[in-house]
Image: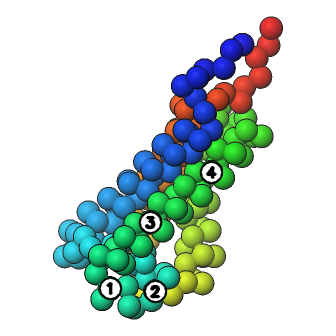
Amino acid sequence: MPSDPNRSVPKAILIGGIVAALLDMLDPIIFYGLRGVAPIKIPQSIASGILGRAAYSDGVPSVLLGLAAHLFIALVWATIFVLAARFLPFLEHHAVVSGLVYGAFIYVVMYYLVLPHTNLYPRIDPSPVVRLNSIAAMVFLVGLPISLANQRFAPSSRVSSN
């Protein structure tokens, strides 16, 4: 069975990571924007994981740092999933369920293992609404798009039977 030249692992990683990063950036811009937070504060809050409180007074450089860090993180998550799917075909065969579960996994890792070890400012215990939005964003806007990009753009991991 000839391989499809329109499918590649790097393409699946790039599309999955970029779509996930874009959706995951739009979510807090809209969610917090409805609560009066300026859009510039969202990438600055990501940059605060590296810079701490200084990210909010650094203007455009901290915005760019936050956007770059956000995209990098999304590409790492996409890379992990797409490479894992090469060895675990059920990730491709059950893309929706796999993506939803992967998004929940990403939430747990980011919010309980990664973010507590950063300079993130301010550190607050989120309200139930904020927590629910964060979980939904990871599940539907990060995990699912990465999984669907893998299914659509990566070479099939299915074994053909002749």
The amino acid on which the numbered mark 1 sits, given as a three-letter code, is: Asp
Q: Earlier in the sequence, mark 1 or mark 4?
A: 1
Specify whether 27 is left or right of 101: left
Q: Label 3, secondary structure: give it.
A: helix
Q: Earlier in the sequence, mark 4 or mark 2?
A: 2
Q: Which label lies toward us, 3 or 4?
A: 3
Q: Which mark, residue 51?
A: 2
Q: Earlier in the sequence, mark 3 or mark 4?
A: 3
Please indicate, yes or no, whether residue 138 appears anywhere in the rendered image: no
Q: In the rendering, at what x and y percent does residue 70 appear? A: 46, 65
Residue hosting label 3: 68
Residue hosting label 1: 58
Residue visible at 32% across and 85% down in the picture: 58
Residue hosting label 4: 79
Q: In the rendering, at what x and y percent does residue 151 appear? A: 58, 33
Q: Residue furthest top?
A: 162
The amino acid on which the numbered mark 4 sits, given as a three-letter code, is: Thr
Q: Residue furthest right?
A: 162
Indicate the quadrant where residue 158 lies: top right
**Is residue 117 placed above or below 108 in the rendered structure?**
below
Please indicate, yes or no, whether residue 15 appears anywhere in the rendered image: yes
